Image (cartoon, rainbow, N blue to C red):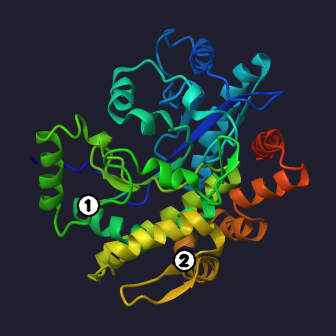
Amino acid sequence: MQIDFASSRQSTLGVEWELALVNARTGELVSVANEVLRGVAAQHPELNEDDEHPHIKRELLLNTVELVTGVCTTVRDAKDDLARSLKAVREVTDPMGVELFCAGSHPFSPPQLQPVTDKERYAKLIDRTQWWGRQMVIYGVHVHVGLNHRNKALPVMNALLNYMPHFQALSASSPYWGGEDTGYASQRALMFQQLPTAGLPFTFNSWGQYEDYVQDMFTTGVIDAGSEIRWDIRPVPALGTIEMRVCDGLATLEEVGAIAALTQCLVEEASQQLDAGWAIPTMPRWFLKENKWRAARYGMDAIIILDAHGNEQLVTDHLKETLERLAPVAEKLGCEEELADVANIIARGAGYQRQRRIADEHDGDLQAVVLDLVQQMRAG
């Protein structure tokens, strides 16, 4: 199988932000995505009732809408794009008494009671995955970064894998599941990897090996489309991007911008290293797997493995060193302000930490946690 890699401008950007729809009074999930999307379409005379807005889309569950940017040059452009879409959604949801929030999971709504969007590919997913598929009441943020050459895709994926626990820790926001504190910073990370082809990507020595893998997946019926390879980090040949999919849902536009800036800077740094003829360092798969678990379990308190030699460091300390190193890259890309917001997440606490603080302040009331998340999104 030959897989062409689309032409992209290096380090251009696209962001996907999955939002939960909840009752404004109770914080319960509400399955009204179809009504919301029809309302959005009605605001645009050029769209038919059944047409999907190019930047506001359906997702697996009827309690979810996804905001998708166009191709952006800067993180600021991407944030502005998302803000416009968010405003368009609110013009529909506010009169409905529906609020929006984003976290890795809903703290208390029962996962098994959430209706699935009526699309063939979603029905097939649930039929195949059964109990695990019915648990997928999870929300994330995906960041695409453009690559100017196919040969960069797999080395850049390896570079981002070295920082997978950093992204997991910064974004971890799913400590609660079905009303129970799981003890994890990110329950979503461990839940999502139960799906076929989800979780850590495999590593390949050449693009040809990657093509062989995809061919094998088609031949054996594991996938019917390339998009069904749901790795935490993956090349997207049709768009000419590398896609960072590790992150739990992020509560605010500021946090989305911070994660987008960190992703864009790391991809640009790796691209520069490849252009200079350098090799990207890699770690054994067992270290990568351990890093994912540590970040999902301990979040910002995770001690992560840094390299193939087994050196370790507290993830927040290594993040601070990384931000200093990336400062010149951020200046080149025009995202210095957004990259600095990563430090704000460290100082303020990741989503899981803030949720537990609110729960403690309200005697364990998880409704208060959801309503606080709603207010965080409104505050931006």
Q: Describe residue 2's horizontal placement relative to residue 262 as left or right.
A: left
Q: Is residue 214 above or below residue 316?
A: above
**Which of the two residues, 105 or 269, is positioned nearer the viewer here?**
105
What label sits on residue 129 in the rendered view?
A: none
Going by the numbered disc 2, the residue's amino acid type is Leu
Q: Is residue 3 visible?
A: no
**Which of the two residues, 359 or 373, is positioned nearer the viewer here?**
359
Mark 1: which secondary structure?
loop
Q: Position of residue 134 (x, y in %)?
A: 48, 33
Q: Position of residue 357 (x, y in %)?
A: 82, 58
How crowded is the residue under tag 1: few (<14 C-alpha within 10 Å), some, or many (20+)? some
**Which of the two residues, 244 or 370, is positioned nearer the viewer here?**
370
Q: Is residue 232 above or below residue 268?
A: above
Q: Position of residue 296 (x, y in %)?
A: 55, 63
Residue that mark 2 sits on: 326
How crowded is the residue under tag 2: few (<14 C-alpha within 10 Å), some, or many (20+)? some
Mark 2: which secondary structure?
helix
The residue sitting at 56% across, 70% down in the picture is 330
Q: Is residue 100 visible?
A: yes
Q: Is residue 313 above or below residue 213?
A: below
Q: Earlier in the sequence, mark 1 or mark 2?
A: 1
Numbered-mark total: 2
Q: Position of residue 355 (x, y in %)?
A: 76, 53
Going by the numbered disc 1, the residue's amino acid type is His
Q: Describe residue 23's horizontal placement relative to residue 62 as left or right.
A: right
Q: CA distance from mark 1 to mark 2?
A: 22 Å
Residue that mark 1 sits on: 149
